[in-house]
Amino acid sequence: MKKVLAFDIDQTLNVAKTPITDEIAELLVKCLDHFEICPISGQKFDQFLIQIVDRLPQPTVEQLKHLHLFVAQGTQYYRYNGTEWEQVYNYPLTDEQVAKISQTIEQAARELGLWEEDKLKPGDEIIENRLSQVTFSALGQKAGTEEKYAWDPDCKKREKIVARCKELAPEFDYEIGGTTSINAITPGMNKVFGMTHLLEELHVEKSDILYFGDMTQPGGNDYPVVQMGIETITVRNHEDTAYALRGILGVL
Ligand SMILES: [Mg+2]
């Protein structure tokens, strides 16, 4: 039997950038009694709390100890020590790397007419420094879900931006994720990095893990996990994930 259930977050556990549903929250808490549960996503730590942890219905300390947060594609790892979330490790980008990436993505998007500054909500930003990665969100963090879905449903806009970024600054990797996002990282600091550290931290083998993700196609931010040879379930959305989890819990 698998020991670890690992999950992409956006579009796998939730509607991108929103808290998980009651149903997913209940299923995850049940899973904590049987598996190590590892969300791994490009998002920041506070979003893991808002979108997942705070939504769990009255988890026990024991259950929380089986929840492992692999933040910023697993370049940061947090676990619950019985009273609070403690950071176990962190591998941030340098200030120079952050500046170079930010400049590159902005230039690429501007050249392609895809720099949508005029559509931002007050105080919002297109490029965000997430410490271990820099994230481009075409319409900002605060844009509405429908608006985001409509922006680039076939990923074509983001593929163009990525192609240009690779010409401008080939020393970085660029991955498409979520609905409007591109994550820029130093090579190797993708989900392979996170999953490799997960194997070490949890003392498990690849074959112990079942991974859920929505971007498992080549170029997608879940694809590196597929390439590692970890068993993967491709979902379209959190409803597919709920369906699969009900099945898993049903046969235990
Ligand atoms: Mg996703």
Image (tube, helix red, strand yellow):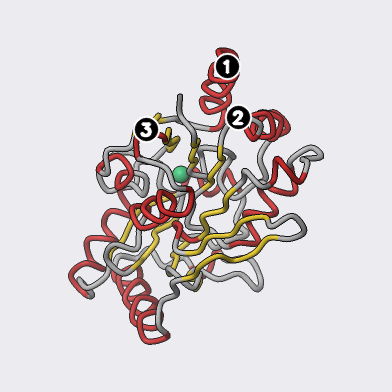
Q: Is residue 216 above or below residue 247?
A: below
Q: Quadrant of the N terminus?
A: top left
Q: Is residue 40 above or below residue 248?
A: below
Q: Residues within 10 Å of mark 3 (few under 14, many from 20)?
A: some
Local SS, label 3: strand
What's the CA distance linking mark 2 and mark 3?
Answer: 19 Å
Q: Which residue has dot 1 on it?
A: 252
CB under 8 Å between callouts 3 and 1?
Answer: no
Dot 2 or dot 3, earlier in sequence: 2
Residue sitting at the far bottom: 96
In the rendered image, residue 22, in percent from the top left (x then y), is placed at 73, 32
CB under 8 Å between callouts 2 and 1?
Answer: yes
Local SS, label 1: loop
Q: Is residue 98 above or below residue 161?
A: below
Q: Is residue 46 above or below residue 242?
A: below
Most foreground residue, 65 or 100: 65
Q: Which residue has dot 3 on it?
A: 232
Q: Amino acid at mark 2?
A: His
Dot 2 or dot 1, earlier in sequence: 2
Most foreground residue, 59 or 180: 59
In the rendered image, residue 144, in percent from the top left (x then y), is placed at 62, 50
Q: Which residue has dot 2 on it?
A: 34
What's the CA distance linking mark 3 and mark 1?
Answer: 19 Å
Which marked residue is nearer to the observer: mark 2 or mark 3? 2
